[in-house]
Amino acid sequence: MYDAIVVGARCAGSPVGMLLAKQGYRVLVVDRSTFPSDTISTHYIQQRGLARLASWGLLDKLLATDVPRIKQMTVSYLDIVINGFADPIQGIDFTCAPRRTVLDTILVDGARAAGAEVREGYTVRELIISDGAVVGIRGGFAGGEVTEERARIVIGADGRNSFVAQAVDAEIYQRVPAECFIYYSYFSGLRTDFHSRIGAREQIGIWPTHDDRTLVAVMRKIDAFEDFRTDVEGNFHQIARTIVPEFGEELATKGKREDRFYPMRYPDNYYRQSHGDGWALVGDAGYHKDPLTGLGISDAFEYAELLAGRVHEGLSGQRPMSEALAEYQRVRDEKSHSGFEFTCAISTLELTPQLLAVFRALGSNAEYAKDFYAMIGGGMTGEEFFAPERMAKLLGAQV
């Protein structure tokens, strides 16, 4: 009998398993993948996410893999360019974009080192439900027998297509339709910091990752998907040349593509009911938004920590588990709301008149640009950044 079973061992699952194991609970973490292994991802970790790794004793392990440190960022919309970087957030003065083959392995090893039992290559086939409550799982390794494991709580950290969410029929209570698709790949021969550059109904993202590679991703509206697929490489380079001509030239003349193109046709943005009798959801299983702002990994870390704290309260008897899990969902929704709304707004690739005015002002105001990057990095909430009095000062400076 386990105290907790966690289904999914990547950016949300391993941390929640690790943190519960550190509290002395008997934890089983299962994943159908084996590690190291890759997954579709933006790779990017904000300062607040790196601060979580530091608090868990895992940041030094990540930095020891020679992941590049990013200390300069450029965001642009059409002719508006916002350069800058946030001041240190929780002691972290850089960001990075590690390969998931590296990051996820560190997280899985962290869970195992904390005392959690980790089963790789294990597929959950069924939840065990008794009197309406989830009490365990049935599953097994490829070609092996199906086994049954029981727990006081089962946590689904198994991504946007979560088996756990589907098995408990978790309701989506807020949904914003997806706007775009992405293709990305890895290139050698380039030297760059972080760029997220939006053109006319298209975007390019550029940032360094492991092994002297640069991740280059392009985004277009969904209605252009079929046309784009007819010439992926040609369209990919065309977007680079159109939005950032100097980089487009460097990509064509100096860049060498080292991998295939990875498509990302994301589902809608959503909040899903994330707790019930004997179960909870974390990471993309419970809350998902467009990858444009790259918040996914840092959110997974933050809300895995939040969930682990509330589950500890329930398991230890400090408060009823149902009450603790309800608070987890409420706090997650409150803290993530501004990022969710900003992501949904900017991922249309067509700024509202209000956001356009803000971006134009930021392009010529270094002080407020630093605050903009603090909001993105987790040092300032969206409510704080977009507070009416602050916007009045920012926009008034443009008059």
Image (cartoon, helix red, strand yellow):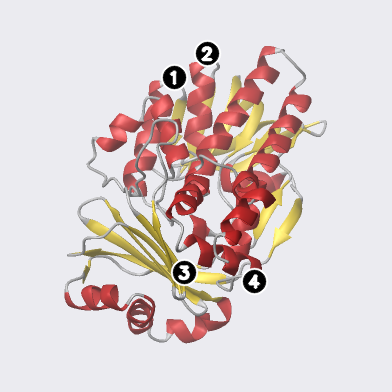
Q: Is residue 267 visible?
A: no
Question: In front of the other: label 4 or label 3?
Answer: 4
Q: Which residue is identified by label 3?
A: 182
The answer to whether marks 2 and 3 mark residues whose Cβ atoms lie closer than 8 Å is no
- Is residue 394 left or right of 328 when viewed as pictured? left
> Which residue corresponds to mark 1?
115
Q: Residue at coordinates 43% horizontally, 33% vertically from top-left?
A: 51
Labels 1 and 3: the sequence-earlier one: 1
Q: Looking at the picture, how far across and down is residue 188, in whole percent? A: 20, 63
Please identify, in this view, whether the residue under mark 1 or under mark 4 is nearer the observer: 4
Mark 3, other Cα within 10 Å: few <14 / some 14–19 / many ≥20? many
Residue tagged 2 = 24
Residue 353: assigned label: 4
- Which residue appears at 53% of the width and 30% of the height? 16
Q: Which amino acid, by three-letter code, is at mark 3?
A: Ile
Q: Which comes before the other along the chain, label 2 or label 4? A: 2
For label 4, count other residues whose C-alpha is less than 10 Å away and answer few (under 14), some (14-19) or many (20+).
Answer: few
